[in-house]
Amino acid sequence: MKNENQKNTLVSLFRKTKIISIRLYRHKGKISVSKKENLNTAGLNIKNESYGFELKDGTLGPSVIDISSLYGETGQFTYDPGFTSTASCESKITYIDGEKGILLYRGYPIDELAEESNFVETAYLLLSGELPTKEEYQEFELAITHHTMVHEQLIKFYNGFRSDAHPMAIMCGVVGALSAFYHDSTDVNDPHQRMIAGRRLIAKMPTIAAMAFKFSLGQPFVYPNNELDYTANFLNMCFAVPAAKNQISPTIARALDKIFILHADHEQNASTSTVRLASSSGANPFAAIAAGIACLWGPAHGGANEAALNMLMEIGSVDKIPEFIKKAKDKNDPFRLMGFGHRVYKNYDPRAKVMQATCHEVLKELGIVDDPLLQVALELEKIALNDDYFVEKKLYPNIDFYSGITLKAMGFPTTMFTALFALARTVGWVAQWNEMIEDPSQRIGRPRQLYTGYDRRKYSKLDVR
């Protein structure tokens, strides 16, 4: 009763003083007041008790409700499996509007960057926040080029794996081991060491991935060539052999460069969130990126392009498409159309548009005119964009739908698809990691849970159970 009288008194007082809006809420048993001329709070009612939480606006996208004090204020947690309605951090790097099919790197549309920029320049943009000047670009490119070699003793790691080891398994181990070789760039509190670590990771990832590819083929490793650009150098390390001179197609190199740009970052996806979570403990950058690689390996994430290609191969020909469409619509059939739909995009994935055109360029360059997989893909795309079932569920083709065909045409086996994804995404991981370290509000990640196990039980000794 006393609290109710206090509440009525406060309301009356603020009405007399003409405060535009007020928020009354309980905190540790006491009634408190939040007052602003333009109140920007969200109200929450729990068991007839009212609480107010600040609304925060971003540059783009919806506002967020700051519930960082929720437990302290109410003794309650939120329950959000998959964190689909939770912003885990504040970021200035990548923006996605899934409803409109928009992807921006530091404010620049992904299609413009894919067509006009290159991967190294895009990497600089993601890391620094701005496109480089000519001098800045030259310095950055030179630094990346001269960090591409790996420690010679690191090569011995590869001989410890079976010859049929998955490239992602190798990359997890080798990238994690980098911290044992580069002690001068593991102090996350030193900005200079963070810069060196980031550049090393971006530079060495193509070498590490190419060596995993060569190891799977039983071929000798090819060392980096400083005369080649980033993507051409990677292709050379993958496909050159000592017995013959290797010719790199500029069209293929440019196509792969676009693929790297399209995969460089994608907001707070599973692997990026993993890198941030691992890094929040103060783990060294090499360990954190290795954790990201492990997460990316999952078929629902980085392995989706491999799954999409396998699906196209399973369908086989255009005349079998109706059969598989029927299976996809059947709720009782476990078959799923891979490469369609996205957790975030509820419109046409903007990366898929670029990837489709790139796919055609590669097939034309390689003289693959009537590729059966492409014919199946094109027919499936037509159906997905016009069939009421797919339109209603917003199952539009995503980037994985075309990237698998393109990479296969280039000569990469399906086991390398996710490794190439990891190579490109390393840039985004490094940018996100660095941003998190510099964030003054950064704390060690510690999600809570809804416990549904046993209540307290008394231990009984073995002989009486």
Image (tube, rainbow, N blue to C red):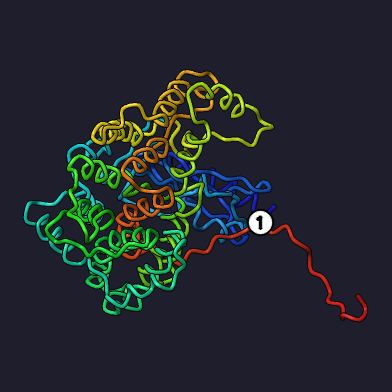
Q: Tell me if residue 172 comes above or below residue 123 in the rendering.
A: below
Question: How many numbered badges does the structure rendering display?
Answer: 1
Q: Quadrant of the C terminus?
A: bottom right
**Few, some or many C-alpha atoms within 10 Å of disc 1 (few <14, some 14-19, many ≥20)?**
few
Q: Quadrant of residue 185?
A: bottom left
Determine whether the residue tagged by mark 1 lies in a helix, strand or loop.
loop
Q: Is residue 31 above or below residue 330?
A: below
Q: Residue at x 24, y 58 (%)?
A: 241
Where residue 136 sits, quadrant-wise, is bottom left
Residue 435 at least partly seen: no
Q: Residue furthest front?
A: 243
Which three-letter amino acid code belongs to the residue tagged 1? Answer: Leu
**Image coordinates for residue 150, horizontal then vertical, percent:** 26, 70
Of 89 and 169, which appears nearest the observer?
169
Q: Name the residue at 14% across, 55% down.
A: 228
Look at mark 1 in the image and give the residue it sits on. 450
Residue 373: give x, y in percent of width and height: 42, 32
**Residue found at the far left of this picture:** 135
Residue 445 appears in the figure: yes
Quadrant of the rendered image containing residue 348 = top left
For the residue pair 412 and 333, the one nearer the viewer reads as: 412
The image shows residue 71 at horizontal and vertical percentages of: 57, 59
- Name the residue at the right extreme: 464
* Rendered position, 182 above or below 260: below
The residue at the point 37 percent across, 58 percent down is 217
Which residue is more in the foreground, 92 or 204?
204
